[in-house]
Amino acid sequence: MIAKKCLIHEIQYLFEEYIQGLSSPFDSFLEEHILESAYYMLQEGSKAVGYYAIHNNELLTQFYISRPYQMHSQKMFSHVLEHHTVNSLFVPTCDELFISLALDKDFTINKQAYFFQDNQVEIIESNVTGDESFRPANLEDLQQIQQICGEFLDHYERRIESGELFTYYRGAELLGIGVVGKSKLFKGLASIGMFTNEAYRKQGIGRVIILELRKWCHKQDIKPISGCWYYNEASKRTLESAGMVTKTRLLRINVT
């Protein structure tokens, strides 16, 4: 079995096979790292039977071999690590093959993030009342969003124009923003997230934003997913209180 550099469209059917085999989806954080990676095709003779992907020449974000050829997976996984300057792996626990191969190596495991899915239970209550409003952001909101949210996101103007950002106001005061990013890998899924104005934290603002984003996704026939840093307990509690549940983790596994 040999490996050669390729473009993602050359392994599209393998990529789709990989996605279909996952036990649960993952959010835009890992998705972006995967899509920004360099891809390598694994060939048996002239046939492509697997692939792997490396982000920024150092982070292995994908390793997949089709079922009929998985007897070669341990050998090829070792080959990849020996022939590239990989120093860590991003491994979602929904990827059984990748996590098993990483565990074989006895590497150091660090917990990176939680991935959440919708619990599919409707939460009736809504705290958007009186002089409060939750709506899609427009360019008139841009200056206040940049001032309140700082470097939470990049390209605010582009995100507003593409319909990714939502605002939550009380009168003229921006309480926080919501973000929706439609998945490029999972059909009918979108990552949702929020940022709360520091002056209004611990008042349930983030929960309202997530509840409103869930409702928006449901109306669009989109399944919401989300994620947060593993040690951000406040975000985890907010997501869970707004109907998001987690059974999947992202691990950062150190090779050296």
Image: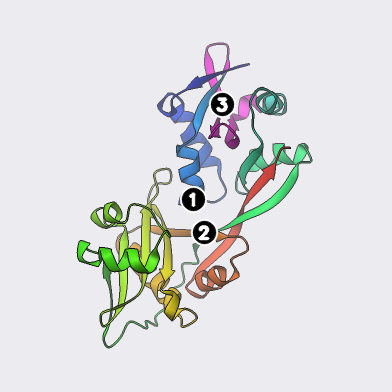
Does the stretch in magenta take in 49?
yes
User: Which residue in the structure is indicated by mark 2?
Assistant: 227
Crowd class of label 2 (few under 14; some 14 to 19; many from 20; radius 10 Å): many
Q: Which class describes the residues within 10 Å of circle 1: few (<14), some (14-19), or many (20+)? A: some
Which of pointers 3 and 2 lies earlier in the amino acid sequence? Answer: 3
Main SS of the magenta part reads: strand
Give coordinates of residue 243: x percent, y percent: 49, 71
Q: Amino acid at mark 3?
A: Gly
Residue beneath the point at 56% across and 68% down: 236
The numbered dot on residue 50 is: 3
Mark on residue 29? Answer: 1
60 relative to 151 in the view: left or right: right
In the image, residue 126 lies at what x, y percent? 37, 81
Residue 197 at x, y = what percent?
41, 74
Q: Position of residue 98 (x, y in %)?
A: 64, 38
Front-lying residue, 32 or 215: 32
Quadrant in the rendering for residue 195: bottom left
N-terminal label among 1 and 2: 1
- Residue sitting at x 54%, y 51%: 24
Residue count near mark 3 (Cα–Cα under 10 Å), binned few <14, some 14–19, many ≥20: many
Mark 3 residue element: strand
Magenta residues (range) = 43-70
Spatial CA span between label 1 and label 2 = 8 Å
| Residue 99 horizontal side relative to residue 117, left or right | right
